[in-house]
Image: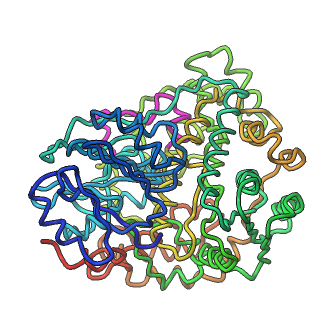
Amino acid sequence: MVGGWWVMLPDTASAAVVARRLCQEGVRSVSHASGRPWLIGCWDARQEVSARAGEVRVVVLGRSSVRAEVLGRRLERVRRPSEVEQAVGGVAGSFHVLASVGGRVWARGTASAACRVFTTRIGELPVAAGRADVLAALSGASPDWEMLALRLMSPPVTSTVLADRTVWQNVHAVPAQEVVAWERDGRRALAACWWRPPEPHLSLKEAAAEVRTALVEAVGTCTAAGGTISADASGGLDSTSLCFLAAREAGHLVTIHWEGRDPQNDDGVWATRVREALPSAAHLVVPAGQSPDWFTGVGGLRLPSEEPCPWVRDFAKQSDLLQRVAAHGSRLHLGGGGGDELFTPYLAYLQDLAAAKPWRVWGQLRHHHHQWRVSRLSQARSVLERTSYRRWLLDAAGHLALAPQSGFAGMLGWQPEPRAPGWTTPEAVATMKRALRTVAANNPQPLSPHRSVHAVLQQVREGGNTVRVMNQTMQGPDIALPYTDDAVVTAALSVRPPEAVQPGTVKPLLGTALTGIVPAHILARQTKGTYDADFYQALRRHRGQLLALAEDSLLARAGLIDAQRLRGAVHFHANHADTAPLIYTVGCEVWLRSLEGGSPASVPHVLSQGAP
Protein backbone atom coordinates (compact mmCIF):
# COMPACT_ATOMS: atom_id res chain seq x y z
CA MET A 1 0.00 0.00 0.00
CA VAL A 2 1.61 3.26 -1.11
CA GLY A 3 2.13 5.58 1.84
CA GLY A 4 1.41 3.07 4.62
CA TRP A 5 3.56 3.53 7.72
CA TRP A 6 3.70 3.08 11.49
CA VAL A 7 5.89 4.38 14.32
CA MET A 8 6.31 2.68 17.70
CA LEU A 9 7.09 4.56 20.92
CA PRO A 10 8.18 3.44 24.40
CA ASP A 11 5.87 3.78 27.39
CA THR A 12 7.45 7.01 28.67
CA ALA A 13 6.23 10.54 29.22
CA SER A 14 8.90 11.90 26.88
CA ALA A 15 7.30 10.09 23.94
CA ALA A 16 4.46 12.62 23.96
CA VAL A 17 6.53 15.18 22.04
CA VAL A 18 7.05 12.83 19.09
CA ALA A 19 3.46 11.61 19.32
CA ARG A 20 2.15 15.15 18.91
CA ARG A 21 4.13 15.53 15.69
CA LEU A 22 2.58 12.37 14.32
CA CYS A 23 -1.04 12.53 15.48
CA GLN A 24 -2.73 14.39 12.65
CA GLU A 25 -6.07 13.91 10.93
CA GLY A 26 -6.42 10.46 9.39
CA VAL A 27 -3.60 8.97 11.46
CA ARG A 28 -4.39 5.89 13.55
CA SER A 29 -3.10 5.31 17.07
CA VAL A 30 -2.99 2.52 19.66
CA SER A 31 -2.05 3.11 23.30
CA HIS A 32 -0.04 1.22 25.87
CA ALA A 33 -2.06 -0.07 28.82
CA SER A 34 -0.94 3.09 30.63
CA GLY A 35 -2.77 5.23 28.08
CA ARG A 36 0.45 6.65 26.64
CA PRO A 37 0.88 6.48 22.85
CA TRP A 38 2.39 3.25 21.55
CA LEU A 39 1.64 2.81 17.81
CA ILE A 40 0.91 5.73 15.53
CA GLY A 41 0.57 5.62 11.77
CA CYS A 42 -1.49 5.07 8.67
CA TRP A 43 -2.26 1.50 7.66
CA ASP A 44 -5.01 -0.53 6.05
CA ALA A 45 -7.43 -1.56 8.79
CA ARG A 46 -8.11 -4.78 6.87
CA GLN A 47 -4.50 -5.82 7.52
CA GLU A 48 -4.72 -5.27 11.28
CA VAL A 49 -5.63 -7.93 13.82
CA SER A 50 -5.40 -6.62 17.36
CA ALA A 51 -6.21 -8.05 20.77
CA ARG A 52 -5.63 -7.30 24.42
CA ALA A 53 -5.69 -9.15 27.72
CA GLY A 54 -5.01 -7.22 30.91
CA GLU A 55 -1.92 -5.09 30.28
CA VAL A 56 -0.99 -7.01 27.13
CA ARG A 57 -1.56 -5.35 23.77
CA VAL A 58 -0.70 -7.10 20.48
CA VAL A 59 -1.15 -5.93 16.91
CA VAL A 60 -0.52 -8.29 14.01
CA LEU A 61 -0.09 -6.03 11.00
CA GLY A 62 -0.02 -7.51 7.52
CA ARG A 63 -1.41 -10.55 5.74
CA SER A 64 -2.21 -13.22 8.33
CA SER A 65 -4.50 -16.12 9.18
CA VAL A 66 -5.08 -15.15 12.81
CA ARG A 67 -8.45 -14.02 14.15
CA ALA A 68 -8.81 -11.43 16.89
CA GLU A 69 -10.81 -13.66 19.23
CA VAL A 70 -8.27 -16.49 18.97
CA LEU A 71 -5.38 -14.10 19.52
CA GLY A 72 -7.13 -12.61 22.54
CA ARG A 73 -7.51 -16.02 24.20
CA ARG A 74 -3.85 -16.81 23.63
CA LEU A 75 -2.77 -13.50 25.16
CA GLU A 76 -4.33 -14.46 28.48
CA ARG A 77 -1.28 -16.67 29.08
CA VAL A 78 1.30 -13.99 28.19
CA ARG A 79 3.30 -12.59 31.10
CA ARG A 80 6.55 -11.56 29.39
CA PRO A 81 7.15 -9.96 25.98
CA SER A 82 8.95 -13.02 24.61
CA GLU A 83 5.84 -15.13 25.28
CA VAL A 84 4.05 -13.21 22.55
CA GLU A 85 5.77 -15.51 20.04
CA GLN A 86 3.88 -18.45 21.50
CA ALA A 87 0.64 -16.54 21.03
CA VAL A 88 1.29 -16.07 17.31
CA GLY A 89 2.83 -19.51 16.77
CA GLY A 90 1.44 -21.29 13.73
CA VAL A 91 -0.07 -18.14 12.21
CA ALA A 92 0.36 -18.16 8.43
CA GLY A 93 1.16 -15.13 6.31
CA SER A 94 3.61 -12.25 6.20
CA PHE A 95 3.24 -9.70 8.98
CA HIS A 96 4.71 -7.59 11.76
CA VAL A 97 4.18 -8.66 15.37
CA LEU A 98 3.98 -5.60 17.64
CA ALA A 99 3.41 -6.01 21.37
CA SER A 100 3.26 -3.98 24.56
CA VAL A 101 3.29 -6.10 27.73
CA GLY A 102 2.85 -3.88 30.75
CA GLY A 103 4.66 -1.16 28.79
CA ARG A 104 7.53 -3.41 27.74
CA VAL A 105 7.78 -3.50 23.97
CA TRP A 106 8.39 -6.38 21.56
CA ALA A 107 8.46 -5.89 17.77
CA ARG A 108 9.66 -7.95 14.84
CA GLY A 109 9.13 -8.43 11.13
CA THR A 110 9.58 -11.57 9.07
CA ALA A 111 12.54 -13.88 8.58
CA SER A 112 12.36 -13.20 4.84
CA ALA A 113 12.64 -9.40 5.32
CA ALA A 114 9.30 -8.87 3.58
CA CYS A 115 8.40 -7.02 6.80
CA ARG A 116 11.16 -5.18 8.63
CA VAL A 117 11.73 -3.03 11.72
CA PHE A 118 14.03 0.00 11.93
CA THR A 119 15.15 2.13 14.87
CA THR A 120 16.63 5.53 15.63
CA ARG A 121 16.74 8.02 18.47
CA ILE A 122 15.00 11.38 18.59
CA GLY A 123 17.14 13.08 21.18
CA GLU A 124 17.27 10.46 23.93
CA LEU A 125 14.02 8.78 22.89
CA PRO A 126 14.21 5.41 21.09
CA VAL A 127 11.76 5.16 18.19
CA ALA A 128 10.99 2.22 15.90
CA ALA A 129 9.13 2.00 12.59
CA GLY A 130 8.36 -0.32 9.72
CA ARG A 131 10.06 2.01 7.23
CA ALA A 132 13.55 3.50 7.36
CA ASP A 133 12.54 6.63 5.44
CA VAL A 134 9.87 7.45 8.01
CA LEU A 135 12.52 7.52 10.73
CA ALA A 136 14.85 9.48 8.46
CA ALA A 137 12.18 12.13 7.97
CA LEU A 138 11.29 12.15 11.65
CA SER A 139 14.90 12.57 12.74
CA GLY A 140 16.15 14.72 9.86
CA ALA A 141 18.67 12.09 8.77
CA SER A 142 20.81 12.50 5.66
CA PRO A 143 21.87 9.77 3.22
CA ASP A 144 24.76 7.58 4.33
CA TRP A 145 27.24 7.86 1.45
CA GLU A 146 29.38 4.98 2.68
CA MET A 147 26.38 2.69 2.60
CA LEU A 148 25.52 3.90 -0.89
CA ALA A 149 29.01 2.88 -1.98
CA LEU A 150 28.40 -0.58 -0.50
CA ARG A 151 25.11 -0.78 -2.39
CA LEU A 152 27.04 -0.73 -5.65
CA MET A 153 28.51 -4.19 -4.98
CA SER A 154 27.09 -7.08 -6.96
CA PRO A 155 25.82 -9.48 -5.79
CA PRO A 156 24.79 -7.61 -2.64
CA VAL A 157 25.75 -8.42 0.93
CA THR A 158 23.38 -5.90 2.52
CA SER A 159 20.98 -8.61 3.74
CA THR A 160 23.70 -10.51 5.61
CA VAL A 161 26.71 -8.83 7.23
CA LEU A 162 25.33 -5.33 6.62
CA ALA A 163 21.79 -6.20 7.68
CA ASP A 164 21.85 -3.70 10.56
CA ARG A 165 22.63 -0.71 8.34
CA THR A 166 20.43 1.48 6.15
CA VAL A 167 21.17 4.19 3.60
CA TRP A 168 20.23 6.79 6.22
CA GLN A 169 22.65 8.07 8.84
CA ASN A 170 21.78 6.95 12.38
CA VAL A 171 18.79 4.90 11.20
CA HIS A 172 19.41 1.26 12.00
CA ALA A 173 17.84 -1.90 10.63
CA VAL A 174 16.94 -4.77 12.90
CA PRO A 175 18.26 -8.02 11.36
CA ALA A 176 15.32 -10.06 10.13
CA GLN A 177 15.73 -12.83 12.70
CA GLU A 178 15.95 -10.42 15.65
CA VAL A 179 13.46 -8.38 17.68
CA VAL A 180 13.27 -4.88 19.08
CA ALA A 181 12.75 -5.25 22.82
CA TRP A 182 12.47 -2.23 25.14
CA GLU A 183 11.96 -2.02 28.85
CA ARG A 184 9.21 0.29 30.00
CA ASP A 185 11.61 3.22 30.34
CA GLY A 186 12.83 2.73 26.77
CA ARG A 187 16.09 0.99 27.62
CA ARG A 188 17.02 -1.69 25.11
CA ALA A 189 16.53 -5.17 26.50
CA LEU A 190 18.96 -7.96 25.73
CA ALA A 191 19.12 -8.77 22.02
CA ALA A 192 16.98 -11.76 21.15
CA CYS A 193 16.31 -13.90 18.10
CA TRP A 194 12.72 -14.85 17.42
CA TRP A 195 13.55 -17.14 14.45
CA ARG A 196 16.36 -19.48 13.47
CA PRO A 197 16.65 -21.47 10.26
CA PRO A 198 15.77 -25.14 10.63
CA GLU A 199 18.27 -27.94 10.53
CA PRO A 200 17.96 -29.62 7.09
CA HIS A 201 16.81 -32.99 8.41
CA LEU A 202 13.69 -34.10 6.53
CA SER A 203 13.38 -36.52 3.66
CA LEU A 204 11.98 -35.25 0.37
CA LYS A 205 8.59 -36.78 1.14
CA GLU A 206 8.45 -35.35 4.66
CA ALA A 207 9.58 -31.88 3.57
CA ALA A 208 7.14 -31.90 0.65
CA ALA A 209 4.26 -32.46 3.06
CA GLU A 210 5.44 -29.48 5.12
CA VAL A 211 5.81 -27.31 2.01
CA ARG A 212 2.37 -28.28 0.75
CA THR A 213 0.71 -27.32 4.03
CA ALA A 214 2.65 -24.06 4.28
CA LEU A 215 1.87 -23.03 0.69
CA VAL A 216 -1.82 -23.87 0.97
CA GLU A 217 -2.04 -21.75 4.13
CA ALA A 218 0.07 -18.94 2.65
CA VAL A 219 -2.13 -18.64 -0.42
CA GLY A 220 -5.15 -18.99 1.86
CA THR A 221 -4.17 -15.73 3.57
CA CYS A 222 -4.25 -14.11 0.13
CA THR A 223 -7.70 -15.40 -0.83
CA ALA A 224 -9.42 -15.23 2.58
CA ALA A 225 -10.86 -11.74 2.12
CA GLY A 226 -12.71 -12.83 -1.02
CA GLY A 227 -13.11 -10.78 -4.15
CA THR A 228 -10.76 -10.84 -7.10
CA ILE A 229 -7.07 -11.60 -6.88
CA SER A 230 -4.56 -11.95 -9.69
CA ALA A 231 -1.43 -14.00 -10.28
CA ASP A 232 1.50 -14.17 -12.64
CA ALA A 233 1.17 -16.99 -15.15
CA SER A 234 4.65 -16.91 -16.64
CA GLY A 235 4.60 -20.61 -17.42
CA GLY A 236 7.32 -21.36 -14.86
CA LEU A 237 6.62 -23.84 -12.07
CA ASP A 238 6.74 -21.25 -9.27
CA SER A 239 4.04 -18.93 -10.58
CA THR A 240 2.08 -21.81 -12.11
CA SER A 241 1.80 -23.49 -8.72
CA LEU A 242 0.40 -20.33 -7.16
CA CYS A 243 -2.22 -20.07 -9.92
CA PHE A 244 -3.55 -23.54 -9.14
CA LEU A 245 -3.46 -22.96 -5.38
CA ALA A 246 -5.28 -19.64 -5.72
CA ALA A 247 -7.89 -21.07 -8.09
CA ARG A 248 -9.01 -23.51 -5.38
CA GLU A 249 -10.01 -20.73 -2.95
CA ALA A 250 -10.25 -17.36 -4.70
CA GLY A 251 -13.63 -15.78 -5.33
CA HIS A 252 -12.33 -14.86 -8.77
CA LEU A 253 -8.85 -15.35 -10.22
CA VAL A 254 -7.22 -13.31 -12.98
CA THR A 255 -3.95 -14.59 -14.44
CA ILE A 256 -1.58 -12.54 -16.57
CA HIS A 257 1.18 -13.60 -18.95
CA TRP A 258 3.40 -11.33 -21.01
CA GLU A 259 4.91 -12.96 -24.05
CA GLY A 260 8.64 -12.92 -24.65
CA ARG A 261 10.32 -12.12 -27.95
CA ASP A 262 12.63 -15.10 -28.14
CA PRO A 263 11.10 -17.86 -30.31
CA GLN A 264 13.13 -20.42 -28.32
CA ASN A 265 11.45 -19.36 -25.07
CA ASP A 266 8.78 -21.97 -24.36
CA ASP A 267 7.22 -20.16 -21.38
CA GLY A 268 4.30 -19.22 -23.63
CA VAL A 269 3.60 -22.87 -24.47
CA TRP A 270 3.42 -23.80 -20.81
CA ALA A 271 1.38 -20.71 -19.91
CA THR A 272 -1.16 -21.81 -22.53
CA ARG A 273 -1.41 -25.20 -20.85
CA VAL A 274 -2.01 -23.49 -17.52
CA ARG A 275 -4.84 -21.42 -18.99
CA GLU A 276 -6.41 -24.52 -20.53
CA ALA A 277 -6.30 -26.27 -17.14
CA LEU A 278 -7.95 -23.32 -15.34
CA PRO A 279 -11.07 -22.56 -17.40
CA SER A 280 -12.86 -20.81 -14.52
CA ALA A 281 -10.21 -18.07 -14.24
CA ALA A 282 -9.93 -14.98 -16.42
CA HIS A 283 -6.69 -14.93 -18.39
CA LEU A 284 -4.83 -11.91 -19.72
CA VAL A 285 -2.14 -12.37 -22.37
CA VAL A 286 0.03 -9.37 -23.25
CA PRO A 287 1.65 -9.84 -26.67
CA ALA A 288 5.31 -9.00 -27.13
CA GLY A 289 5.56 -5.32 -27.95
CA GLN A 290 2.41 -4.30 -26.06
CA SER A 291 4.10 -4.08 -22.66
CA PRO A 292 6.87 -1.61 -21.81
CA ASP A 293 10.42 -2.83 -22.25
CA TRP A 294 12.85 -3.08 -19.39
CA PHE A 295 14.55 0.29 -18.78
CA THR A 296 11.58 2.21 -20.23
CA GLY A 297 11.64 5.76 -18.84
CA VAL A 298 14.43 5.02 -16.38
CA GLY A 299 16.40 8.15 -17.35
CA GLY A 300 13.70 10.45 -16.01
CA LEU A 301 12.29 8.15 -13.35
CA ARG A 302 11.74 9.63 -9.90
CA LEU A 303 10.81 6.83 -7.55
CA PRO A 304 10.54 7.93 -3.91
CA SER A 305 11.44 4.88 -1.87
CA GLU A 306 13.11 4.21 1.45
CA GLU A 307 16.20 2.77 -0.23
CA PRO A 308 17.71 2.25 -3.70
CA CYS A 309 15.86 -0.30 -5.81
CA PRO A 310 17.65 -2.42 -8.42
CA TRP A 311 14.25 -3.35 -9.83
CA VAL A 312 13.82 0.15 -11.30
CA ARG A 313 14.76 -1.62 -14.53
CA ASP A 314 11.35 -3.33 -14.35
CA PHE A 315 9.34 -0.39 -13.03
CA ALA A 316 7.45 0.46 -16.24
CA LYS A 317 6.71 -3.16 -17.06
CA GLN A 318 5.59 -3.99 -13.52
CA SER A 319 3.44 -0.86 -13.37
CA ASP A 320 1.77 -1.85 -16.63
CA LEU A 321 1.06 -5.33 -15.26
CA LEU A 322 -0.49 -3.97 -12.06
CA GLN A 323 -2.63 -1.51 -14.01
CA ARG A 324 -3.94 -4.30 -16.21
CA VAL A 325 -4.94 -6.58 -13.33
CA ALA A 326 -6.37 -3.63 -11.38
CA ALA A 327 -8.63 -2.89 -14.35
CA HIS A 328 -10.05 -6.39 -13.87
CA GLY A 329 -10.74 -5.77 -10.18
CA SER A 330 -7.71 -7.35 -8.54
CA ARG A 331 -7.12 -6.33 -4.93
CA LEU A 332 -3.93 -8.42 -4.52
CA HIS A 333 -1.41 -9.77 -7.02
CA LEU A 334 0.52 -13.01 -6.44
CA GLY A 335 4.04 -13.41 -7.78
CA GLY A 336 6.36 -16.41 -7.86
CA GLY A 337 9.40 -14.56 -6.54
CA GLY A 338 11.41 -16.65 -4.09
CA GLY A 339 10.56 -19.97 -5.69
CA ASP A 340 13.80 -20.30 -7.63
CA GLU A 341 15.82 -19.53 -4.52
CA LEU A 342 13.99 -22.01 -2.27
CA PHE A 343 13.59 -24.95 -4.60
CA THR A 344 16.78 -24.89 -6.68
CA PRO A 345 19.43 -26.22 -4.27
CA TYR A 346 22.47 -23.99 -4.02
CA LEU A 347 25.57 -25.96 -5.01
CA ALA A 348 27.27 -25.20 -1.71
CA TYR A 349 25.22 -28.08 -0.29
CA LEU A 350 28.02 -30.23 -1.71
CA GLN A 351 30.49 -28.57 0.67
CA ASP A 352 28.12 -29.13 3.58
CA LEU A 353 27.75 -32.77 2.57
CA ALA A 354 31.51 -33.23 2.14
CA ALA A 355 32.06 -32.00 5.69
CA ALA A 356 29.35 -34.17 7.24
CA LYS A 357 29.29 -37.31 5.06
CA PRO A 358 32.23 -37.22 2.66
CA TRP A 359 31.54 -40.73 1.36
CA ARG A 360 28.21 -39.52 -0.07
CA VAL A 361 29.43 -36.43 -1.89
CA TRP A 362 31.13 -38.32 -4.73
CA GLY A 363 27.88 -39.76 -5.98
CA GLN A 364 26.38 -36.28 -5.98
CA LEU A 365 29.34 -34.91 -7.91
CA ARG A 366 28.63 -37.32 -10.74
CA HIS A 367 25.29 -35.55 -11.23
CA HIS A 368 27.05 -32.23 -11.79
CA HIS A 369 30.13 -33.35 -13.73
CA HIS A 370 28.71 -33.06 -17.24
CA GLN A 371 26.54 -30.02 -16.50
CA TRP A 372 29.51 -27.89 -15.48
CA ARG A 373 32.15 -29.41 -17.79
CA VAL A 374 34.83 -29.37 -15.13
CA SER A 375 37.26 -32.12 -14.22
CA ARG A 376 36.50 -34.33 -11.26
CA LEU A 377 39.73 -33.24 -9.63
CA SER A 378 38.75 -29.57 -9.86
CA GLN A 379 35.31 -30.42 -8.52
CA ALA A 380 36.81 -32.29 -5.59
CA ARG A 381 39.16 -29.44 -4.71
CA SER A 382 36.32 -26.93 -4.78
CA VAL A 383 33.97 -29.06 -2.71
CA LEU A 384 36.55 -29.83 -0.04
CA GLU A 385 37.30 -26.13 0.52
CA ARG A 386 36.08 -25.15 4.02
CA THR A 387 36.73 -21.43 4.34
CA SER A 388 35.17 -19.89 7.46
CA TYR A 389 32.65 -17.09 7.05
CA ARG A 390 35.14 -14.60 8.46
CA ARG A 391 37.82 -15.76 6.02
CA TRP A 392 35.31 -15.60 3.16
CA LEU A 393 34.59 -11.94 3.97
CA LEU A 394 38.29 -11.11 4.03
CA ASP A 395 38.81 -12.89 0.72
CA ALA A 396 35.81 -11.08 -0.77
CA ALA A 397 37.31 -7.75 0.28
CA GLY A 398 40.53 -8.63 -1.51
CA HIS A 399 38.76 -9.84 -4.65
CA LEU A 400 36.45 -6.85 -5.25
CA ALA A 401 38.31 -5.65 -8.33
CA LEU A 402 38.70 -9.11 -9.91
CA ALA A 403 36.51 -10.55 -12.63
CA PRO A 404 33.47 -12.37 -11.21
CA GLN A 405 33.87 -16.05 -10.45
CA SER A 406 32.13 -18.25 -12.96
CA GLY A 407 31.32 -21.90 -13.47
CA PHE A 408 31.19 -24.57 -10.80
CA ALA A 409 33.54 -22.90 -8.29
CA GLY A 410 31.61 -19.64 -8.52
CA MET A 411 28.47 -21.37 -7.25
CA LEU A 412 30.13 -22.59 -4.06
CA GLY A 413 31.02 -20.82 -0.82
CA TRP A 414 28.79 -18.81 1.46
CA GLN A 415 27.35 -16.94 -1.51
CA PRO A 416 28.70 -15.70 -4.85
CA GLU A 417 31.50 -13.27 -4.02
CA PRO A 418 30.60 -9.59 -4.45
CA ARG A 419 32.43 -7.48 -6.97
CA ALA A 420 32.85 -3.75 -7.47
CA PRO A 421 31.63 -2.73 -10.94
CA GLY A 422 34.27 -1.49 -13.32
CA TRP A 423 33.01 2.08 -13.15
CA THR A 424 33.41 2.51 -9.38
CA THR A 425 36.18 4.85 -8.28
CA PRO A 426 39.23 3.66 -6.34
CA GLU A 427 37.87 5.56 -3.35
CA ALA A 428 34.57 3.68 -3.51
CA VAL A 429 36.38 0.35 -3.80
CA ALA A 430 38.49 1.28 -0.78
CA THR A 431 35.29 2.02 1.14
CA MET A 432 33.90 -1.40 0.24
CA LYS A 433 37.10 -3.16 1.31
CA ARG A 434 37.23 -1.29 4.59
CA ALA A 435 33.61 -2.13 5.40
CA LEU A 436 33.99 -5.85 4.68
CA ARG A 437 37.21 -6.07 6.68
CA THR A 438 35.67 -4.19 9.60
CA VAL A 439 32.76 -6.61 9.66
CA ALA A 440 35.11 -9.59 9.41
CA ALA A 441 37.12 -8.31 12.38
CA ASN A 442 34.02 -8.77 14.55
CA ASN A 443 33.86 -12.47 13.59
CA PRO A 444 30.21 -12.37 12.44
CA GLN A 445 28.10 -15.49 12.37
CA PRO A 446 26.56 -16.65 9.09
CA LEU A 447 22.78 -16.91 8.79
CA SER A 448 23.21 -20.68 9.18
CA PRO A 449 26.21 -22.95 9.80
CA HIS A 450 25.25 -24.64 6.52
CA ARG A 451 26.60 -22.77 3.50
CA SER A 452 23.68 -23.76 1.31
CA VAL A 453 21.10 -22.55 3.84
CA HIS A 454 22.98 -19.28 4.39
CA ALA A 455 23.11 -18.65 0.64
CA VAL A 456 19.42 -19.40 0.13
CA LEU A 457 18.42 -17.15 3.02
CA GLN A 458 20.55 -14.33 1.62
CA GLN A 459 18.67 -14.53 -1.68
CA VAL A 460 15.26 -14.95 -0.03
CA ARG A 461 15.87 -11.82 2.03
CA GLU A 462 16.84 -9.85 -1.03
CA GLY A 463 13.52 -10.91 -2.55
CA GLY A 464 11.53 -10.16 0.60
CA ASN A 465 13.09 -6.75 0.88
CA THR A 466 12.29 -6.09 -2.79
CA VAL A 467 8.58 -6.81 -2.48
CA ARG A 468 8.41 -4.73 0.70
CA VAL A 469 9.77 -1.65 -1.06
CA MET A 470 7.70 -2.29 -4.20
CA ASN A 471 4.53 -2.24 -2.13
CA GLN A 472 5.58 1.08 -0.61
CA THR A 473 6.09 2.75 -3.97
CA MET A 474 3.92 1.22 -6.71
CA GLN A 475 0.34 2.13 -7.52
CA GLY A 476 -2.25 -0.62 -7.83
CA PRO A 477 -2.88 -3.80 -5.87
CA ASP A 478 -0.28 -4.92 -3.37
CA ILE A 479 2.04 -7.71 -4.44
CA ALA A 480 2.27 -10.89 -2.36
CA LEU A 481 5.11 -13.39 -2.69
CA PRO A 482 3.88 -16.49 -0.82
CA TYR A 483 7.26 -18.19 -1.26
CA THR A 484 8.74 -15.60 1.09
CA ASP A 485 6.24 -16.35 3.87
CA ASP A 486 8.19 -17.58 6.89
CA ALA A 487 6.37 -20.89 7.18
CA VAL A 488 7.11 -21.67 3.53
CA VAL A 489 10.77 -20.70 3.92
CA THR A 490 11.09 -22.86 7.04
CA ALA A 491 9.46 -25.85 5.37
CA ALA A 492 11.60 -25.61 2.23
CA LEU A 493 14.84 -25.28 4.20
CA SER A 494 14.01 -28.38 6.24
CA VAL A 495 14.78 -30.81 3.42
CA ARG A 496 18.09 -32.62 3.24
CA PRO A 497 19.55 -30.89 0.14
CA PRO A 498 20.84 -34.04 -1.59
CA GLU A 499 17.25 -35.34 -1.65
CA ALA A 500 16.07 -32.15 -3.36
CA VAL A 501 18.41 -32.83 -6.29
CA GLN A 502 17.18 -35.32 -8.87
CA PRO A 503 18.90 -35.35 -12.26
CA GLY A 504 16.38 -34.66 -15.00
CA THR A 505 13.82 -33.21 -12.60
CA VAL A 506 13.24 -29.49 -12.07
CA LYS A 507 12.51 -28.50 -8.47
CA PRO A 508 11.53 -31.97 -7.19
CA LEU A 509 10.62 -30.65 -3.73
CA LEU A 510 8.04 -28.22 -5.11
CA GLY A 511 6.76 -30.72 -7.64
CA THR A 512 6.30 -33.40 -4.99
CA ALA A 513 4.58 -30.93 -2.67
CA LEU A 514 2.00 -29.95 -5.28
CA THR A 515 1.27 -33.34 -6.77
CA GLY A 516 -2.51 -33.60 -7.04
CA ILE A 517 -2.96 -29.82 -7.04
CA VAL A 518 -1.01 -28.97 -10.19
CA PRO A 519 -1.75 -31.36 -13.09
CA ALA A 520 0.95 -33.95 -13.68
CA HIS A 521 1.56 -32.94 -17.30
CA ILE A 522 2.39 -29.40 -16.13
CA LEU A 523 4.64 -30.59 -13.31
CA ALA A 524 6.57 -32.54 -15.94
CA ARG A 525 8.17 -29.41 -17.45
CA GLN A 526 11.97 -29.72 -17.61
CA THR A 527 12.88 -26.41 -19.30
CA LYS A 528 13.22 -22.81 -18.16
CA GLY A 529 12.38 -19.77 -20.28
CA THR A 530 15.01 -17.20 -21.17
CA TYR A 531 14.52 -13.53 -21.95
CA ASP A 532 17.85 -12.56 -23.49
CA ALA A 533 16.18 -11.32 -26.68
CA ASP A 534 13.88 -9.08 -24.63
CA PHE A 535 16.85 -7.74 -22.72
CA TYR A 536 18.96 -6.92 -25.77
CA GLN A 537 16.10 -5.14 -27.49
CA ALA A 538 15.38 -3.15 -24.32
CA LEU A 539 19.03 -2.17 -24.03
CA ARG A 540 19.17 -1.06 -27.68
CA ARG A 541 15.96 0.94 -27.42
CA HIS A 542 16.68 2.58 -24.09
CA ARG A 543 20.44 2.96 -24.06
CA GLY A 544 19.82 6.70 -24.21
CA GLN A 545 17.84 6.50 -20.96
CA LEU A 546 20.79 4.87 -19.23
CA LEU A 547 23.24 7.35 -20.71
CA ALA A 548 21.05 10.17 -19.39
CA LEU A 549 21.64 8.87 -15.88
CA ALA A 550 25.39 9.09 -16.41
CA GLU A 551 25.10 12.77 -17.36
CA ASP A 552 25.62 14.92 -14.30
CA SER A 553 25.45 11.76 -12.17
CA LEU A 554 24.96 12.36 -8.46
CA LEU A 555 26.98 9.23 -7.74
CA ALA A 556 29.81 10.67 -9.83
CA ARG A 557 29.55 14.00 -8.02
CA ALA A 558 29.90 12.11 -4.75
CA GLY A 559 33.06 10.44 -6.02
CA LEU A 560 31.59 6.93 -6.08
CA ILE A 561 31.59 6.23 -9.83
CA ASP A 562 33.42 7.33 -12.96
CA ALA A 563 30.67 8.55 -15.30
CA GLN A 564 32.77 8.08 -18.43
CA ARG A 565 33.45 4.43 -17.63
CA LEU A 566 29.76 3.93 -16.86
CA ARG A 567 28.84 5.32 -20.28
CA GLY A 568 31.34 2.96 -21.88
CA ALA A 569 29.83 0.00 -20.05
CA VAL A 570 26.33 0.92 -21.22
CA HIS A 571 27.57 1.00 -24.82
CA PHE A 572 29.51 -2.25 -24.74
CA HIS A 573 27.74 -4.69 -22.41
CA ALA A 574 28.33 -8.15 -23.82
CA ASN A 575 25.69 -10.30 -22.18
CA HIS A 576 22.68 -10.38 -19.91
CA ALA A 577 24.65 -11.45 -16.84
CA ASP A 578 26.85 -8.35 -17.09
CA THR A 579 23.89 -6.11 -16.26
CA ALA A 580 23.66 -7.18 -12.62
CA PRO A 581 26.15 -4.52 -11.45
CA LEU A 582 24.49 -1.99 -13.75
CA ILE A 583 21.04 -2.31 -12.21
CA TYR A 584 22.40 -1.72 -8.70
CA THR A 585 24.13 1.45 -9.89
CA VAL A 586 21.02 2.61 -11.74
CA GLY A 587 18.94 1.96 -8.62
CA CYS A 588 21.24 4.13 -6.50
CA GLU A 589 21.30 6.94 -9.07
CA VAL A 590 17.51 7.01 -9.45
CA TRP A 591 17.10 6.99 -5.67
CA LEU A 592 19.40 9.97 -5.20
CA ARG A 593 17.61 11.91 -7.94
CA SER A 594 14.27 11.13 -6.29
CA LEU A 595 15.19 12.82 -3.02
CA GLU A 596 13.79 16.29 -2.58
CA GLY A 597 16.31 18.57 -0.97
CA GLY A 598 18.12 15.57 0.51
CA SER A 599 15.11 14.36 2.50
CA PRO A 600 12.88 11.33 1.97
CA ALA A 601 10.28 12.09 -0.68
CA SER A 602 7.87 9.23 -0.12
CA VAL A 603 6.83 9.80 3.48
CA PRO A 604 3.70 11.65 4.56
CA HIS A 605 3.89 15.44 4.55
CA VAL A 606 3.39 15.58 8.31
CA LEU A 607 6.72 13.80 8.79
CA SER A 608 8.78 15.92 6.42
CA GLN A 609 8.55 19.22 8.26
CA GLY A 610 12.10 18.95 9.59
CA ALA A 611 13.68 17.39 12.61
CA PRO A 612 12.61 18.63 16.03
440 within the magenta span: yes
Is residue 150 in sight in this rendering?
A: yes
What residue sits 53% from the left and 26% below the top? 199
In the depicted view, which residue is nearer to us: 4 or 388?
4
What residue sits 63% from the left and 29% below the top? 495
Is residue 265 in sight in this rendering?
A: no
Indicate the position of residue 230 as horizontal and vertical percent values: 68, 66
In the depicted view, which residue is nearer to us: 179 or 363?
179
228 within the magenta span: no
- The residues colored magenta run 436-457
Location of residue 489 by image quarter: top right
What residue sits 82% from the left and 62% below the top? 271
Q: In the displayed structure, does residue 322 sit left or right of residue 38? A: right
Q: Is residue 244 above or below residue 17?
A: above
Indicate the position of residue 240 as horizontal and vertical percent values: 76, 55
Indicate the position of residue 136 as horizontal and vertical percent values: 26, 66
